[in-house]
Amino acid sequence: MTETRAHSDAHRTIVPARNRLQSAAAALLCILIGVLLYVVSNSPNVQWSVIPGYLFDPTILSGVRLTLIFTVLSIVIALILGTGLALMKQAQNGVLSGFAGLYIWFFRGTPLLVQIIFWFNIQLFVPTVGFGAYHIQTNALVTSFVAALLALSLNEAAYMAEIVRGGLLSVDPGQREAAAALGYRPGQIAVRVILPQALRVITPAIGNQTISMLKTTSLVSIVAAQDLLTRVQNIYATNFLIIELLTVASLWYLVLTTVASVLQYFIERRLGAAQGVQAPTAVARFLGLFTEGRR
Amino acid sequence: MISGDAKVAMRARAVRKSFGALEVLSGIDLDVREGEVVCILGPSGSGKSTFLRCINHLEKVDGGTIHVDGHLIGYEDRDGVLHELHAKALARQRSEIGMVFQRFNLFAHLSARDNIVQPQRLVRGAEPAAARARAQELLEMVGLGDRGDAYPSQLSGGQQQRVAIARALAMRPKLMLFDEPTSALDPELVGEVLTVIRKLAEEGMTMIIVTHEVGFARDVADRVVFMDGGVVVEEGSASDLITNPQQDRTRVFLRRML
């Protein structure tokens, strides 16, 4: 008797409990999505067939290029400025730390859209720049491209400053003490000891900011800075294919953010692998990205 | 043994230090002569680590003076007024004083070898080849000649501490400070670090060692200083102080440690 029971115990079929409420909700959701797809695809006013043609239109492609340029330039400039601000905020000198605090407070506390419009209209404020006999109209200097880049970079720098500061704070204070005890000067401690280790912590956050920036750049269309959104707006202003062209832009934004997310995944996996075995320097770690599988 | 007329390597006079309202050092006087090994014993919170950190100005003293190799540490005496040194001059002073920390503090992003190479390059301006050769020599001296490429996270605590000692020695310091060098180690790893320190003592390195290892202090120290409550309670030759303490506080402490 006991023997047969033991035998059958090993071969029982297991049926997991089913959540009826979730099943019902899922069915309802499927129906809703189906209806929505039917309505959208059968709309007589939307010409879906024009979308493939516009996807690789030269005007659109140059807009994509400019969106990428805005993203990369503003992230790089923001990272440099943000690192400076983060170091200033830690300074003993009250003017330096106060300025950094004020900067971060101001640029995070006002809308980016307002900042973009402000820089575009800077000539109302400062009509000419230059010194001595040499003067130039601010209007000629601050084109919509420059205004957009200034606004994106200066705004992003405030966020980068906080990210970098968090990274600096994450480095064990013992590292600074050891370097000081060896006779490192403050600049050497920052550049050769603290920053390389902080980079491990701030890299994932920089990735997030970059992905976010790809979409944020669309705000510069308000000053017609010729980014992707500006281009589609220019086109639908003449042919009124608004939904179609916004779909084109959205597809491109999705492609850009997806590619960036995949890149970020590989970078973070690389960093994760390096947690037990720390790679020599940030640069070596970056180069290591392209020689994956060697180790 | 150290002869009575050997040069003074470190001279502390009336050193005081407070953290907020808490006075941690209440007037420390201590002389350490060249080639001498001095161990500082004392209960937790007695101020011994703080005093050690004052010697290379990692902590600023609130009163008193410390001279290392005849130089006033951390300050410039201008007509009796002490002006704090600028970062560059301070860095130069510190480069002459080696320090080994309780928690090793190896640079986590550099290999063991580069931990020893980088300070020689940045602080002493050494040529890469010379710095690497010296690093290898020192790694071999601490018994880690084959571990130069390992990162700190790949080394045991005892190995990390030996690399940290090698790193400090690379600067050819006139004085070595050890801040509880074995307190963070698993018991079975203590010996390998103490062996290296003992070897340095035999080579005549001037050392001030804050430690809880009473047996080690008795073996290696020329002199033992017992601190409690921010003052030097008692000092004397290692064998005298440890086997025959004169003060009650010293006796109580030693009874607990042995």
Image (cartoon, coloured by chain):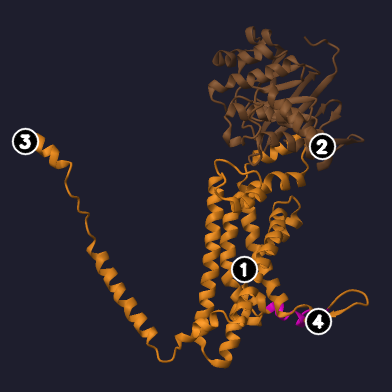
Q: Using the numbered discs, state the Cα–Cα distance from disc 3 to disc 2 in whole angstroms.
A: 84 Å
Q: Using the numbered discs, state the Cα–Cα distance from disc 1 to disc 4 in whole angstroms.
A: 26 Å
Query: Which mark is in front, 2 or 1?
Result: 2
Look at label 2 and name its amino acid: Glu
The mark found on residue A109 in the picture is: 1
Q: Which one of the lettered chains is coloured orange?
A: A
Name the residue tied to disc 2: B127
Q: Mark 4 Cα within 10 Å, few/some/many (few <14, many 20+)?
A: few
Position of B126 relative to B253 (above/below): below
Specify whether disc 3 shares its chain with disc 2.
no
Contact? badges 4 and 2 (CB < 8 Å): no
Q: Using the numbered discs, state the Cα–Cα distance from disc 2 to disc 1 in whole angstroms.
A: 50 Å
Position of A32 relative to B137 (above/below): below
Query: Which mark is in front, 1 or 3?
Result: 3
Name the one closer to the observer, B50 or B133: B133
Name the one closer to the observer, A67 or B82: A67
Pinpoint residue B256: horizontal percent, then vertical percent.
54, 16
Helix, strand or loop under label 3: loop
Name the residue tied to disc 3: A1
Q: Chain of mark 3?
A: A
Name the residue tied to disc 4: A127
Q: Earlier in the sequence, mark 1 or mark 4?
A: 1
Residues shaded magenta: A118-128
Helix, strand or loop under label 2: loop
